[in-house]
Amino acid sequence: MKIKNNRLVDDSGKMVEWVSSPNHSGKLIDNGRPTTLVMHYTAGGPASRTVDYFKKSSAQASAHLVIGRDGEITQMIKLDTIAWHAGKSRWKGRDRVNRFSIGIELANYGKLKQTQSGDWVSWSGQTVPSNRVVVDDHKHFPGKQYGWEIFDPEQMDAVIAAAQAIVSEYNLDPWDLVGHEDISIHRKIDPGPAFAMDKFRTMVFGREEDTWNEFKYRVDSHSGLNLRTEPSVSGRLIENLSDGTEVHVIENIGNWWLVCKVINGDEDVTGYVHRNWLTPG
């Protein structure tokens, strides 16, 4: 795939299906160039229902691309234009992520609940077969297990191809690929643990997953971030890292990362922090 005039083009040279949404603003603030790609799930059934919803001005919501479980892609907003997908959000020190990002919606029920009979159902009551469910915790609430609908291979192939075209055209970096859950912490949980974000970045950029540890991070929390002796809230507090503190990542242990505090370019104290309040840079 490639980008032509801010439209997604498939391998045959044909524009992907276009269905216009009225829910958009002006050009993206960086001269119409996106600097972030945000992944979402629809929390619903067929992609066509999401497309129909985004066609309505009353929805007050939209995304640039909607991708079905079968891998079919529909574009609804040009990629240089502000879509309404992120809401209240922040990434790399900038608020209102809609203004500088592309949003992709993946048809997927997302978080599921289990009935007393053992069935998995969506928030709307739609039953999801157990062979389409993974059970995992979410990084926003570790230790609590929930069901999550899987993402189909055809869908993943399509979103990887679309993302490769986007990052190539607009020169995005690996940490410019994020989830809604990353830019709206504790407000949104999509695309959730069934969408392996690190593996997604690896597939898009063709790098080994271990190379993510090469990135430097900073604390992104006005109240600071607790550095602990163990990868758990029960670990002894070493110190509170102030907002903006630079750290080097040593090891990823799920949602807890072993990091080393950096002072004036030199590595200092080491401990564990929760990844939610770290941002690249």
Image (spheres, grey):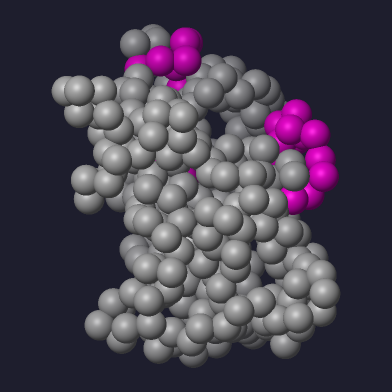
Work out whether residue 257 or residue 208 is closer to the camera in this orientation and state it: 208
Q: Could you say where residue 78 lies in the image, as x and y percent from the top left? A: 59, 83
Quarter of the view holding residue 45: bottom left
Q: In this picture, is 204 found above or below 11? A: above
Q: Which residues are magenta?
A: 204-233
Question: Horizontally, is 162 left or right of 143 in the view?
Answer: right
Q: In this picture, is 76 found above or below 174? A: below
Quarter of the view holding residue 252: top right
Residue shown at 82%/45% (left/top)? Answer: 206
Residue shown at 46%/56% (left/top)? Answer: 107
Report whether residue 223 is seen.
Answer: no
Work out whether residue 61 or residue 187 is closer to the camera in this orientation and state it: 61
Q: In this picture, is 138 found above or below 219? A: above
Residue shown at 40%/88% (left/top)? Answer: 22
Q: Could you say where residue 128 lies in the image, as x and y percent from the top left? A: 35, 39
Work out whether residue 37 or residue 49 is closer to the camera in this orientation and state it: 49
Quarter of the view holding residue 163: bottom right
Work out whether residue 121 or residue 112 is closer to the camera in this orientation and state it: 121
Specify whether residue 220 is painted magenta. yes
Question: Horizontally, is 148 left or right of 125 in the view?
Answer: right
Residue shown at 34%/74% (left/top)? Answer: 53
Q: Could you say where residue 80 lies in the image, as x and y percent from the top left? A: 61, 82
Q: Could you say where residue 1 lies in the image, as x and y percent from the top left? A: 78, 68
